[in-house]
């Protein structure tokens, strides 16, 4: 990292086959490539192709944002590579809630292996047990059936919908007492 570029958190989560660690500058090339893949960016609310300058700007803002924690997902059992990322954002410690998001399994070797679900569960568990959160919410396109399925399996329930120019958006919530974690 360049001088002054430090991650505000050093949290790490270990599961049987995953290590979730902080996003660092050395991850930016990989995340940039994943974020611009059509099959990934089309699931994001901002589905534009991003430039390297925009990506660096996002990272600089992240470094100064105390309300976001981005985890890089490393598969440690079979693939032994960084395979994706996920995050808690808009963390509100007073209200004890946060938003789950930025989930992407960018490494094609890791898709269809349950890594998304394991990552969501691990990050939510961290939020509930380590941060004292009582609620984690998210928004996802209804047509993104793979992600909706993951979130439902993790225990998220539908709490609302909203319309967007790209389809119906599901608002889903996971409460500590209702989760498969925490």
Image (spheres, rainbow, N blue to C red):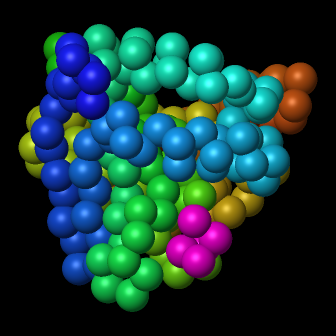
Q: Nearer the viewer, residue 72 or 96?
A: 72
Determine the image quadrant of residue 109: bottom right
Range of residues picked out in magenta: 107-111
At a point 64% along the width and 70% down the height, the residue shown is: 108
Residue 30 screen position, x and y as percent? 53, 49
Whether 18 is drawn above or below 139: the answer is below
Image quarter in which the C terminus is found: bottom left
Residue 142 falls left or right of residue 132: right
Relative vertical location of residue 125 with respect to residue 2 in this rendering, above or below:
below
Count of numbered badges drawn on the protein: 0
Q: Which of 9 and 87 is in front in this view?
A: 9
Q: Residue, x 47% and y 38% (percent of image)? A: 28
Answer yes or no: is residue 62 visible: yes
Image: 38 above or below 64: below
* Residue at figure coordinates x 86%, y 34% from the top left: 167
Q: Nearer the viewer, residue 87 or 138?
A: 87
Asked whether, in this view, residue 49 is left or right of residue 23, the answer is: right
User: Does residue 155 appear left or right of residue 24 in this picture?
Assistant: right
Image: 80 above or below 12 = below
In the rendered image, residue 108 lying in the magenta stretch gets the answer yes
On the image, the x and y values in percent for residue 72 come to 37, 51
Magenta stretch: includes residue 67: no
């Amino acid at each position: 990292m360049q001088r002054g570029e430090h991650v505000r958190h050093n949290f790490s989560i270990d599961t049987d086959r995953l290590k979730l660690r902080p996003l660092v500058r050395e991850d930016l090339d990989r995340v940039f490539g994943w974020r611009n893949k059509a099959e990934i960016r089309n699931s994001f609310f901002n589905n534009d192709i991003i430039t390297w300058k925009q990506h660096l700007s996002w990272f600089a803002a992240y470094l100064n944002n105390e309300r976001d924690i981005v985890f890089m997902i490393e598969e440690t059992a079979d693939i032994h590579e960084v395979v994706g990322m996920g995050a808690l954002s808009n963390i509100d410690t007073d209200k004890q809630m946060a938003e789950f998001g930025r989930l992407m399994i960018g490494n094609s070797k890791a898709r269809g292996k349950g890594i998304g679900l394991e990552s969501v569960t691990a990050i939510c568990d961290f939020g509930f047990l380590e941060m004292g959160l009582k609620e984690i919410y998210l928004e996802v396109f209804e047509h993104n059936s793979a992600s909706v399925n993951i979130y439902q399996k993790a225990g998220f329930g539908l709490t609302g919908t909203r319309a967007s120019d790209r389809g119906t958006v599901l608002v889903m919530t996971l409460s500590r007492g209702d989760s498969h974690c925490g």
